[in-house]
Image (tube, rainbow, N blue to C red):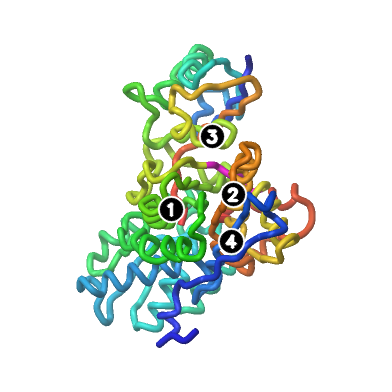
């Protein structure tokens, strides 16, 4: 089950510059473990003490994963995952 | 309706039904026309509230200088009020914002300090904080952490919506400073059991997320995720498509950020239709489209529109 993950500029040093990568997982936590296996070091930039880092936002099909169960959010075939740093509006 | 002065005419905006855009007679969309505020945006509410609050506690006195990081609308609101009330104002604004915003700020007599495009508003906040350290006598109202911002919406926007639409089931607004959602969202949650509070957050081009490292990210101090039911990220293509749809179907000429909010509102509406539930979905029209005409996104190809907004702070 392949899921497309969009990587922000700031984390592309872990993906050889790739903007999108494919990964697998039934939950976001699984997906991040799978990403880590291919792109060592990336997990530590996304997760801290078992939680999403404060300034990291992850969206599943454009919905903020913090409202979908966080790391336990379930993923399915064809889902798209977007990682973005938190920025200000206003 | 009569007011003692222009400044007093903030709020009390119309809530209009959208019969052509609503998916069914049972699932209805309602637009809160915040462009009908003194300077034409929802930010007049927060700006007046922050100024009155700072005057009341003595931080802001005749001759004071106001300092504010802003991507535009808050600055325009503050600058208008500052001109009328006799304050000096310095706005720190990212350079990747529409020229109309800069021109309006200049017209109202604001001094504009441009901050680098990369990093967007995060960078404007950083520059303003640095300036504030060098000018401790300037009054940094700081919309991202000023409780008077959210209080304006708790006291006015939320009650206005409930009074006009007692059957409201969903409230959808943009997430920037988070003031509108936190204030109106809290009020509506207290009064309407089961109401859903939905955030639409603009997703910009890569330049705007060009931080040096992730720890430079920014979450406004006002933000409390417990107020929200959920939060959607909406890119410029969807925002532009929806803002055109709003104009084509209902005649409303709105700014681009409203397109992002409408996109989320229509997603919520679709879900209600699928679940065969009745819904009254109120959403915020943040401002009119006038300030964004120079972007060229109101006509022509969507690919071109998307390209024109890449790297711009369009919301």
Marks 4, 3 in one chain: no
- Residue at the image position 52 percent from the left and 32 percent from the top: A83
Queried whether the magenta region covers residue B234, the answer comes back as yes
Assess disc 1: are there few (<14), some (14-19) or many (≥20) residues with their C-alpha within 10 Å of its C-alpha.
many
In this view, B242 is above or below A76: below
The residue singled out by tag 1 in the image is B181
Distance of label 3 from label 2 (alpha carbons): 30 Å
In this view, B107 is above or below B230: below
- Earlier-in-chain disc, 2 versus 4: 4
The residue singled out by tag 2 in the image is B265
Helix, strand or loop at label 2? It is helix
- Residue at the image position 22 percent from the left and 71 percent from the top: B59
The location of residue A45, given as percent across then percent down, is 41, 26
The residue singled out by tag 3 in the image is A9
Marks 1, 2 in one chain: yes
Q: Chain of mark 1?
A: B
Q: Chain of mark 4?
A: B
What is the quadrant of residue B100 in the picture?
Answer: bottom right
């Amino acid at each position: 089950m392949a899921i497309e993950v969009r990587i922000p500029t700031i984390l592309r040093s872990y993906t050889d510059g790739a903007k999108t990568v494919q990964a697998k997982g039934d939950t976001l936590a699984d997906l991040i473990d799978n990403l880590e296996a291919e792109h060592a070091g990336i997990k530590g930039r996304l997760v801290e003490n078992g939680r999403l880092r404060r300034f990291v936002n992850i969206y599943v099909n454009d919905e903020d994963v913090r409202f979908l169960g966080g790391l336990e959010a379930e993923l399915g075939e064809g889902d798209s995952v977007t990682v973005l740093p938190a920025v200000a509006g206003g | 309706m009569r007011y003692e002065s222009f400044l007093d005419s903030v709020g009390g905006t119309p809530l209009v039904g959208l019969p052509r855009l609503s998916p069914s007679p049972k699932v209805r969309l309602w637009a809160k026309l915040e462009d009908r505020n003194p300077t034409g945006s929802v930010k007049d509410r927060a700006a007046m509230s922050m100024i009155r609050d700072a005057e009341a506690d003595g931080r802001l006195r005749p001759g004071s200088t106001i300092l504010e990081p802003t991507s535009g609308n808050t600055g325009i609101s503050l600058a208008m009020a500052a001109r009328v009330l006799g304050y000096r104002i310095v706005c720190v604004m990212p350079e990747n914002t529409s020229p109309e915003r800069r021109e309006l700020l200049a017209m109202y007599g604001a001094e504009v300090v441009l901050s680098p495009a990369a990093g967007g508003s995060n960078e404007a906040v950083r520059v303003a904080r640095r300036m504030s350290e060098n000018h401790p006598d300037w009054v940094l109202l700081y919309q991202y952490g000023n409780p008077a911002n959210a209080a304006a919406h708790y006291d006015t926007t939320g009650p206005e919506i409930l009074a006009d639409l007692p059957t409201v089931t969903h409230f959808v607004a943009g997430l920037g400073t988070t003031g509108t959602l936190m204030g109106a969202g809290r009020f509506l949650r207290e009064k309407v059991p089961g109401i859903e509070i939905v955030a639409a957050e603009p997703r910009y081009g890569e330049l705007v997320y060009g931080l040096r490292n992730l720890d430079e990210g920014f979450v406004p101090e006002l933000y409390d995720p417990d107020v929200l039911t959920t939060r959607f990220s909406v890119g410029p293509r969807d925002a532009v498509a929806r803002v055109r749809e709003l104009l084509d179907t209902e005649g409303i000429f709105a700014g681009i950020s409203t397109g992002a909010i409408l996109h989320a509102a229509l997603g919520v509406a679709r879900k209600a239709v699928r679940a065969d539930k009745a819904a009254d979905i109120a959403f915020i029209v943040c401002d009119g489209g006038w300030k964004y005409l120079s972007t060229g996104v109101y006509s022509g190809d969507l690919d071109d529109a998307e390209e024109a907004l890449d790297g711009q702070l369009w919301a």
